[in-house]
Image (cartoon, helix red, strand yellow):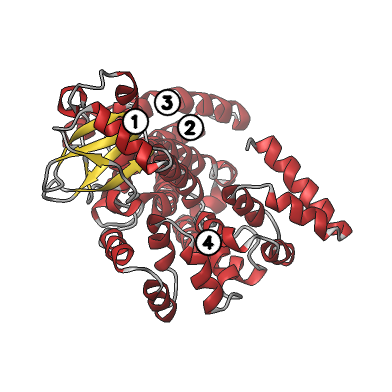
Amino acid sequence: MTEPAQATRLQALREALDTGTMRQVRRMIAALKPAEIAHLLESLPPPQRQIVWELVDHDDEGDVLVELNEDVRGSLMRDMDSEQIVAAAANLDLDDLADLLAELPETINREVLRSLDASDRLRLETVLRYAEDSAGGLMNLDTLTVRGDVTVEVVLRYLRMRREIPRGTDAIYVVDRNNRYLGSLFITSVLTADPEQRVSEIMDAETPAIAATTPAQEVVTLFEDLDLVSAAVVDENERLLGRITIDDVVDVMRDEANHSVLSMAGLDEEDDTFAGVGVSARRRSIWLGMNVVTAFLAAWVAGLFEATLEEVVMLAILMPIVPSMGGVAGTQTLILIIRNIALGRMDGANARWLLGRELGVAALNSAVWAGVVALISSFWFNTWTIGLVIALALSINLVCGAASGFAIPLLLKRLNIDPAIAGGVMLIMITDVIGLLAFLGLGTLILR
């Protein structure tokens, strides 16, 4: 559903809720897919959300829960008893069930596992063995496999006998007698090949399988680089475990994009947009607290030059310019480096070149903008010395900001800290302190 269509649907649903026409609301919900219902639930304040959730068909509850972000899913599940949760989980695909089990209490987990037959329980354990953000955690266990020595006619009879194939299947995987992956047999090849040809003659042995331990971001890169619609997932012995389809990859890309945008503000993409005031304030307070520390540090640096500020008032007027310009320049580099790290484009070979490029850009920009600000300041206060001070300080802080924006994400990555979350706060602290030290220090030396 497009964004305008979602907005229209949400508006119609709200109007129906406001007028109390529950029959109309029920009909509207019944016409939606689970992902669309999840989007609507996330877009509603808690009182209306609970009303809509109670109208969702019980057979769809599990699929809707999987599509919701963690906060909203947790709030809804807290009001469900164990029997409801087990019933909702019973209708899920095993890969979706694996995602849900991670958030359920141990007692309910045991009930869910007891409800599965031995075969499904074993397959579920296979998925749970791998991290959620890995190929094994993303994979779907529903695959079609054939041997390479059978004919296309045998494959066609096999498909007709099954009557249906897993959703999103574009290829059948060719395996040996030990279930080791050999290649992919695309459905289009099955439909167009000579029925007497053997699978080994028309399969694509070049289509790579993805190791189950591969990080999700690398999976996205593989799909992008190779234009894949689906890919086989194998264990360390090349045995076929499952498959990843393009819709799984789109979910990862969407989550990464949300994470990148929200983390820069210290927010989490799994947070409930309509969470209570207390909960939201508590989550954001840590970042406000860190900003207070940064602000007091900058104020302390300014306080070291109190005597200079009392004598040269124009320094106080121009003081905010230098930290601000350095922060902007540093943020541009910071975002660029974080993006390249996320896309796997940073390594030792290109990092040095990129650092040189960023320092060069900062030097060129500092020459241009330091000159502009110096001219304006000199005419404003009718003295060239203030222009010299602010030009030198701007040049220093712009270059330091670019260097910090480059180094901070690499340092945080090495410490296993998400650069998108902590990088911005550290950069502001550095550019504020260096900017004030450079400007007020130079002012003290030159103007007093």
Residue 218 location in percent, x, y?
A: 28, 41
Q: Residues within 10 Å of mark 3 (few under 14, many from 20)?
A: some
Q: Residues within 10 Å of mark 4 (few under 14, many from 20)?
A: many
Q: Residue at x 73, y 44 (%)?
A: 9
Disc 3 versus disc 4: nearer the observer: 4
Label 3 to label 4: alpha-carbon separation: 54 Å
Q: How many marks?
A: 4
The first of marks 3 and 4 along the sequence is 4
Is 11 placed left or right of 135 in the picture? right
Label 1 to label 3: alpha-carbon separation: 35 Å
Q: Residue at x 51, y 42 (%)?
A: 324
Disc 4 versus disc 1: nearer the observer: 4
The first of marks 4 and 2 along the sequence is 4
- Whether residue 21 is visible: yes
Q: Residues within 10 Å of mark 2 (few under 14, many from 20)?
A: some
The first of marks 4 and 1 along the sequence is 4
Residue denoted by label 1: 224
Q: Residue furthest right?
A: 19
Is 403 placed left or right of 175 in the picture? right
Q: Amino acid at mark 1?
A: Glu
Residue denoted by label 4: 62
Asked whether disc 3 touches disc 4, contact meaning CB atoms under 8 Å apart, the reply is no
Where disc 2 sits, the SS reads helix
Label 1 to label 2: alpha-carbon separation: 55 Å
Disc 1 versus disc 3: nearer the observer: 1
Where is residue 51, by image quadrant?
Answer: bottom right
Residue 221 location in percent, x, y?
A: 31, 35
Residue denoted by label 3: 365
Where disc 4 sits, the SS reads helix
Please tell me the numbered disc located at residue 385: 2
- Whether residue 289 is visible: no
